[in-house]
Image (tube, rainbow, N blue to C red):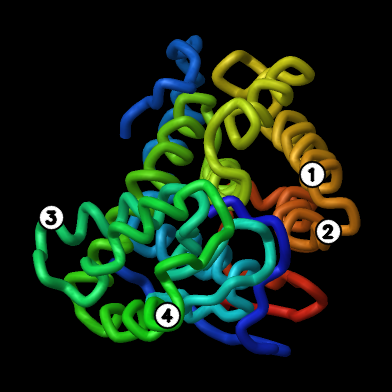
Amino acid sequence: MKRAGVLILAAVPVVLAATAYGSSPTAHDDPRPVPPSATTQGRAAVGLAAPAMKNLAQELVASAENSTLDWRSAYGYVQDIGDGQGYTAGVIGFCTGTHDLLVLVETYTAAHPGNGLARYLPALRRVDGTDSHQGLDPGFPAAWRAEAKVPAFQAAQDAERDRIYFDPAVSTAKRDGLGPLGQFIYYDAMVFHGPGTDGFYGIRARAKQRAKPPAEGGSERAYLGTFLDIRRATMQAKHPGIDTSRVDTAQRKFLDEGNLELRTPLVWKVYGETYKVP
């Protein structure tokens, strides 16, 4: 997902939740940097991929994407939020206009022919890269919601989320010598902006021009502060007036508190709503 606006499913004034649940470089990435210190290396190795931490990462993203900590409730979500990217759907906001939803349905159909979304593949290919609903209305949203009840499709959504967003972000953060908070900051940026030189990898490249990550001998807090500065400016430049609280009162708050390990309990705000993970 390359989110342009604010997606609100429901107002959740205060949410209490925390249940544990249970990489490779990309073509956009740069060569492996100088190895970080043993301490930093160990922190990065534990990182966001540990089951409980990965669940926490999904809760944090869901607070911004779906206004809930119950990220599993989003498998059946589908809506055009008016951001120019067609339908946004599923656990991480795959979009009909940004290719990731098409890839998801193609991959799922290859493994499960005759599923309830397969008949929409011709239309999904036609609208890919646009905000058009041609060939999708009126039945596609209902078909998505129905298929989202199938465990195999839920698993397919998880796998595609990890392949496109989570695994590349965490892998890149580890190579930059970043601990759990930094890994999450990279992941959320990858989810919101997408990869590429105009997305996450571009933000990272500009941040590295201004500050060294730990793998290159820099201060982790200083580098992450720079990354968030550039990310916030990128959000505002692309979408003037956008709410940047997912950075300002969530990630920046954790950084200002010195919580580089992303230890719980956590309290943060997104779009004015307060969330808590004990």
Q: Which comes sooner in the sequence, label 3 or label 4?
A: 3
Crowd class of label 1 (few under 14; some 14 to 19; many from 20; radius 10 Å): few
Relative to 34, 155 lies left or right: left
Q: What residue type is labelled 2?
A: Ile
**Residue of label 4:** 141
**Residue of label 2:** 242
**Residue of label 1:** 238
Answer whether residue 258 is visible to the viewer in this image: yes
The reply to whether the C-beta atoms of the residues labelled 3 and 4 are less than 8 Å apart is no
At x 22% / y 77%, what residue is drawn? 116
Relative to 213, 89 lies left or right: left
Q: What residue type is labelled 1?
A: Lys
Relative to 231, 124 lies left or right: left
Q: How far apart are marks 4 and 1 (CA)?
A: 28 Å
Relative to 183, 91 lies left or right: left
**Residue of label 3:** 110
At x 39% / y 80%, what residue is drawn? 76
Q: Position of residue 58 (x, y in %)?
A: 47, 64
Q: Which comes sooner in the sequence, label 4 or label 1?
A: 4
Q: In what element is the residue under mark 3?
A: helix
Residue in front for this viewpoint, 160 or 33: 160
Q: In what element is the residue under mark 2?
A: loop
